[in-house]
Amino acid sequence: MQILFLAVLIILFFYFHSRRNKLEKQAKLLNKLLYIEKSPQKYIDEIDKLLSGILSEKERNINFIQKSTGLLYAGEFHEAIRMLTDDVIKIPPNWQVFYYHNLLLSLYLNNEADRANEILKDAKGTIDMYYKKDYNKVTIELIYAVSDFYNGNIDNCRDFFFNLKDVATNDYRIALGHYFTGKILETEGKTEDAKCSFEQAKEYGKGSFMEKL
């Protein structure tokens, strides 16, 4: 009996070890496709391969949220919104920040500010809970900064966007900083400075919707 129990433990150990290695390789590949090769479409295609397999509900929901990141940067805002609101059945634990980041940015960029504001109002408690836990604070600050911009609260978000390039962890995040800096400079009538910011957004945002500015 003890030998059987030990055998089961060994099998479970190797199963979970193998699964962990597989997930780590998968995460590295997705990161490479989106942020190094800067190909949202290849990233989306790779996640579609995962979605075509046998998955638990939690795994499927995570993959949908991951796919929406690619859709967001590809400029397919409507499809990202549809997927997050229709296909994600339940937001898995610790994925709420990513879910609301992708949904809210897609809505604001798709000129659906009123709808985004309502969702942000409902989700604020959850988002702030993660912020207090020091979880993805820059991502959360980006959500609020984008909201401030589209609601005309430029003074509240100006410094954040001007400094985002210094704290961003990938080129697409840096590109968003330049993009919104350019939009803010436009409102201030600084056309030439805005143009320079948009050029920087294009450079860092290659492969994304920002390259087409």
Image (cartoon, rainbow, N blue to C red):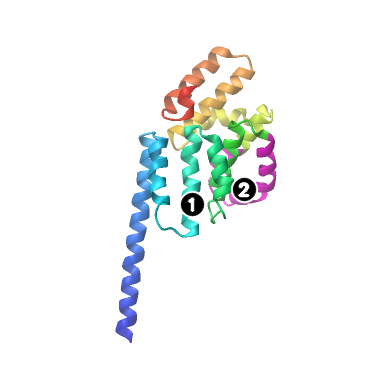
- Residue 19 is one of the magenta-drawn residues: no
Q: In the drawing, what numbered circle is on residue 182?
A: none
Mark 2 neighbour class, 10 Å CA radius: few under 14, some 14 to 19, many 20 or more: many
Residue 99 pos. (x, y %):
55, 46
Mark 2 vs 1: CB contact within 8 A: no
Mark 1 neighbour class, 10 Å CA radius: few under 14, some 14 to 19, many 20 or more: many
Would you place residue 6 above or below residue 109 in this image?
Answer: below
Mark 2–mark 1 distance (CA, rounded to whole Å)? 18 Å
Identify which residue, 194 or 80, lies in the foreground: 80
Question: Which portion, as a residue range, is magenta?
Answer: 114-143
Residue 169 pos. (x, y %):
45, 38
Q: Name the amino acid type tagged 2.
A: Ile
Q: Is the magenta stretch mostly helix, strand or loop?
A: helix
- The residue carrying mark 1 is 62
For residue 63, say whether it is visible: yes
Q: Is mark 1 on a helix, strand or loop?
A: helix
Q: Earlier in the sequence, mark 2 or mark 1?
A: 1
- The residue carrying mark 2 is 127
Q: Which residue lies furthest to the top in this view?
A: 192
- Residue 120 is one of the magenta-drawn residues: yes
Q: Is mark 2 on a helix, strand or loop?
A: helix
Q: Name the amino acid type tagged 1.
A: Ile
- Tell us which disc is closer to us: 2 or 1: 1
Residue 18 pos. (x, y %):
32, 61
> Residue visible at 56% across and 29% down?
161
Residue 44 pos. (x, y %):
42, 41
For residue 140, say whether it is visible: no
* Number of marks: 2
Quadrant in the picture for the N terminus: bottom left
